[in-house]
Image (cartoon, grey):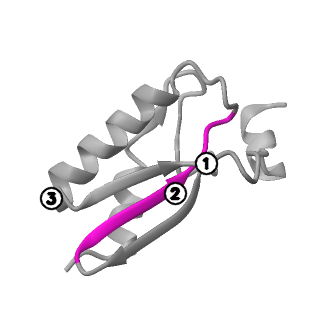
Amino acid sequence: MVSKEDVVNTLKTCNDPELGLDVWTLGLIYEVSIKNKEVFIKMTFTTPYCPYGPAIVVEIKTKLRENYGDNASVEVVFEPPWKASEELRELLGV
């Protein structure tokens, strides 16, 4: 049985190559749901024009499918726009 914790741990292995942090820590993941053995991720990018966005989605889909089968999907949304948390801003030194 797939748990949300398992999926989150997988997401923590997917990095934004520009910032060098994983998508979970960056707060790019808005939703993780598991229904009938199907894993669904709703996420965003740091900017709609993120040059690494498509590559990040491919990495996430690949890792999800490797770990949880073909019943994994990713939806990219831009509402609400991503905003770095205060904690993340401190971590990044901005």
Q: Nearer the viewer, residue 8 or 42?
A: 42
Quarter of the image that includes the N terminus: bottom left
Circle 1 sits in a helix, a strand or a loop, which is it? loop
Q: Identify the magenta region.
A: 37-46
- Real-space Cα distance between discs 3 and 2? 18 Å
N-terminal label among 1 and 3: 3
Q: Residue at x 58, y 50 (%)?
A: 25
Q: Residues within 10 Å of mark 3 (few under 14, many from 20)?
A: few
- Type of residue at label 2? Lys
Left or right: 33, with 24 as reference point: left
In the displayed structure, 32 sits above or below 24; it is below
Report which residue position mark 3 lands on. Answer: 69
Q: Residues within 10 Å of mark 1 (few under 14, many from 20)?
A: some
Report which residue position mark 2 lands on. Answer: 42
Q: Position of residue 71 (x, y in %)?
A: 22, 62
Q: Main secondary structure of the magenta part?
A: strand
- Real-space Cα distance between discs 1 and 3? 23 Å
Circle 2 sits in a helix, a strand or a loop, which is it? strand
Quarter of the image that includes the C terminus: top right
- Type of residue at label 1? Val
Find out whether the residues at labels 1 and 2 contact each other: C-beta distance under 8 Å.
Answer: yes
Would residue 34 be counted in the magenta stretch?
no
- Type of residue at label 3? Gly
- Real-space Cα distance between discs 1 and 2? 7 Å
In the displayed structure, 36 sits above or below 42; it is below
Q: Residue 77 got which mark? A: 1
Label count reads 3
Circle 3 sits in a helix, a strand or a loop, which is it? loop
